[in-house]
Structure formats: structure tokens, C-alpha cells
Amino acid sequence: MKKFIGIILSCLLIVFQGNAQTESATRGSANNVRQPNVIVVPYTTEGQDVRQILDNNLMVLNAISKVKEEFNNRGFNTKDFITLLKANKNDAFISASKGIENDPVKDVVLASKADIEISVRISVNQHPGGVAEVNLVLQAAEAISGDSFANSSYTSGKFRTADSLGLATRALSQIDDDFFTLVQNGFNMIMETGRNLKVLIEFGPNCTINAYSETTTGNDLEIELTNWLDNNAYGGNYEINSSEQVIDISMKVPLYDQITNKPYAINKLRAPLIKLLNSLIPDYKVQTTKNTGQQISLRFE
């Protein structure tokens, strides 16, 4: 009888150990989920000087700091937008009010190598009778392409007060875990499906060719580009639209290089694509007219 009980206890012990190993393995895989590098930036409109906004609006400055702190508290990796902005001494880089066409906030975001950009928009609404309310809007977007995938809004509620900073603190305290879950889930989806990249191929005024011209292979240019996309679009996800003036391609590329584990650089596509086009239409030279994180523009000349 004792021997029988011992056998049963041994079996139970093996089962419990197996369950413990399974549970541990599950926790381990969950802990290995990659978290994005996040940068928190102020919401700006075209022509606004972001430095002046931060220097003259303490509410915005505090909101950026608080949202960044909330990401840190939840274990996200963050980039400090304020530090990066101050580190750059070139006024033409950080001011859009001097006739500069580039987006100063976007320039800092791209320089930061962040994966996710969190835009913070905070404003005070005045109501009759001295009543005020602070509204907070958070929007998460893939840093390079700018594709938005999560947004949430919060309010301080209406109070008869002139203390806008106090109301802002109250609005910021309303941020809940749901927003951070949306950010993580959105990032996981980008990791799985890739980010968007636009490729524009134009034909210069002196060109006598178009998307349907025959190439050195005997196929027309659009067919050859479709074959190229089959092999180079991440997950085979792409769309190609052609006319006589332009070939418009929207394709997915990975967020990280699968070999180096570093952020995927689009020059890995640009250089081979130019080489391919030059081989297909050797009578014309392909030139780069624009090369940013979210778009490659090429032209046959």
C-alpha cells in the first residue's frame, strides 16, 4: 500500500513539475516581446516654431515630460525629445518659421531612431463664468512612415479656476493602461506586417518611354517591377499603379533588418532598384530625386 501511494505521489510530482515548466516557459516568451523605442513630441502645425512653444508654454513642456515618464514606468524605452532638440545648435534645423520647408519635429524624430512617435496635444478650453477645462490628445504613429495606429483623449473636467497647470495635471492623471496596450499591440502588428514605403518612378520630359515600354527582357517595365516586388515587398504586400507619367508603388518593408537586427535602411532597396531599372532601360539614366524614411522618388532622364 505504501509503495502504491509512493508511486502516485511521484506521478503527481512529475505532473506539477511539467506544469511549472510550461508556465515558466510561457512567462519567458511573454517577457521576450520586443518593446519599441518611443519618442514623445509636442503637437505642432505648419509654420510653428517648436522651440518657442516649449519655451513659452509650461503646460506643453510638463505634458511631454509626464507622458514620457508614464512610458518609462511601464518599461518602454524612450528617447528624450527635449534633449535632442537642445543638442542641435542649427536654428535652421529646429525652426520652421524661417522659411524652411522641412518639418523640425520630424527631423528630430528621424534623428532619434525611435520606432514610435507619440504626439501630445494639450489645450485649455474656456467656458462662461470663469470655468475652464484642459483636453489632452495622445496619438501614436510609426516614426518613419507617420502611419497612425493608436489615439486616446482625456479631459480634466470643467472647473471654475484659472489654474490651467492644475487642470493639465488632472487630465494627465487620467491616462490609463489601455493606451499603452494599444501602443504595444500596434507596434507588434508593424513588426509582423512591416511599415509602409512609397516608391515613385517618374519619366522626365525628354523620355519617350513609360510604364508599358518594353525592357531588355522582352517584358514591359510594369511587369518587371511587379516581379521585383514579389521578391522584395515584405510579406509580399504591395500595390502598383501605373500611368504614362509615373509608376506609383506602395509596399511593405520590415521595421528591423532580420540579419543585423538594426532599423531597416531603405537604401537596401534603393540601390538595387536603381541598378535593376538601369539594366532594364539602358538608354536612360535613373536619378534619385527624393530619398527619405518613407519615400523613394526616382526619375528616368
Image: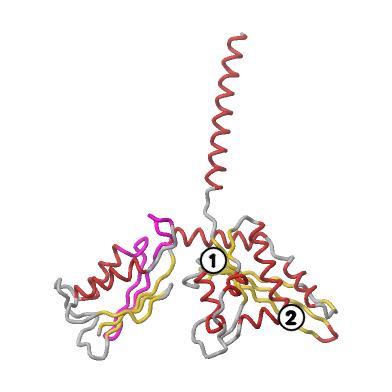
Does 145 appear above or below 212? above
Three-letter code, disc 2: Val
Q: Which residue is mark 1?
A: 116
Q: Which residues are magenta?
A: 232-261
Q: Is residue 185 left or right of residue 155?
A: left
Q: Which residue is mark 2?
A: 124
Is residue 249 part of the magenta span, yes or no? yes
Q: Quadrant of residue 282?
A: bottom left
Instruction: Name the residue rendered at 45%, 58% in the picture.
Output: 192
Instruction: Name the residue rendered at 67%, 66% in the picture.
Output: 67
Q: Quadrant of the C terminus?
A: bottom left
Q: Quadrant of residue 280?
A: bottom left
Q: Residues within 10 Å of mark 1 (few under 14, many from 20)?
A: many
Q: Are marks 1 and 2 in contact (CB under 8 Å)?
A: no
Position of residue 97 measured from the top left corner of the image (x, y, whole percent)? 57, 88
| Label 2 residue SS | strand
